[in-house]
Image (cartoon, helix red, strand yellow):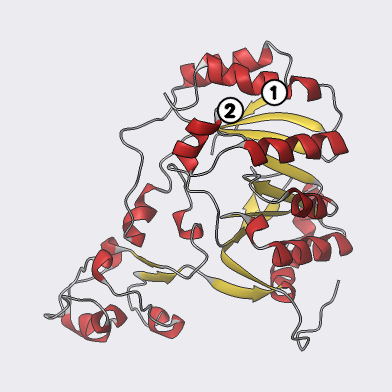
Amino acid sequence: MVIERSDEREPRVNVFNVQKYNLYDGPGIRTIVFFKGCPLRCQWCANPEGLEFHTDMMYKETMCKPYNPCAQTCPLGQICFDYKDKEHPIDIRKYEKKLPTLEDVKGCPEGALTITNESKTISELMEIIHEDDAFYEMSGGGVTLSGGECTAQPAGALALLQACKSDGINTAIETCGFTPQKLMMKLAEFCDLFLYDLKHMDSKRHNELVGVGNERILSNLKELLETGYDVKVRMPMLKEINDSEEEIRQIVEFLLPYKDYSNFHGIDLLPYHKLGVNKYKQLGMDYKIDGDPSLTDTDLDRIERYILSYDFPVTVVRH
């Protein structure tokens, strides 16, 4: 599908990353497009740079060097409240909400600064995606829309899905499911697979953990399954948060009516990991999780066996 760059009506997508050669988020080798902005605030989110719809800046203190010539040209020197002596490192929490320009960031000699948002047209994204056509064809892969939450940018998500389908590229959406049902079903027309998160079955506890109840999420999941769209359920797993037998039982019983549906592709268990923890400091944000809710292999084996006892296909996704 070719879209003329001169067409001012072409949708744009705000992204914070385009990741190639992904093997976890859909079949085959995939390109993941990470959309900016999310309606949820999961306490364990591994991509905090994708939470806000506005542009953020990340500051990697370990890459920042304490020498004067660098300090004199640092864009943060113009906007930090107490940056008088031009000494590094600085505290990103104290900078005013006036971001350096992309050119400023590129001028950082140590690469310590990153702007977390880039606006791209569908054409620009498709150029990146098509660079790996051979991998998609060889592996049965394609493109996965992730985030943040891709459904929170509906026009861009729909246009990108349509462009991929027009060019014969397999599509997947990784979603929290918290979006209007009419929109979800429209996106489903151009999506080959939903990777659908289920975090907690108790709506009150769900709200405590992620900032919204789960009624809309469960309703959308039922609609997708009952309408015949392909879905794989994904369960982020955290110790003493959603790993109890009672919690797993509630999820399994919710899914039992769909066990034999050909469009239900089982359950992925996503063990908690710490890969995103350092990003919070780089963004000047507090990390909400106390302690370490990582599950042991014994824990994961226990949960896997329990789900298998219901004759559900289940996979532990280990990054």
Q: In the image, what residue type sits under mark 2? A: Met
On screen, residue 223 above or below 36: above
Q: Quadrant of residue 255?
A: top right
At 69% from the left and 41% from the top, the residue drawn is 195
As helix, strand or loop, the secondary structure at mark 1 comes to: helix
- Taking the spot 49% from the left edge, 61% from the top edge, the residue there is 52
Q: From the viewer's perspective, is residue 241 above or below residue 72?
A: above
Report the amino acid beneath label 1. Answer: Phe
Residue 197: tell me if it is visible: no
Of the image marks 1 and 2, the number of the one nearer the N terminus: 2
Tally of marks:
2
- Considering depth in this image, is 184 or 19 the residue closer to the camera? 184
Residue 145 in percent (x, y) is at: 68, 55
Q: Which residue is mark 2?
A: 201
Could you tell me residue 262's position as x and y percent?
A: 87, 29
Q: Which residue is mark 1?
A: 254
Query: What percent of the width, then of the height, locates residue 192?
Result: 82, 47
Asked whether disc 1 touches disc 2, contact meaning CB atoms under 8 Å apart, the reply is yes
Cα separation between marks 1 and 2: 9 Å
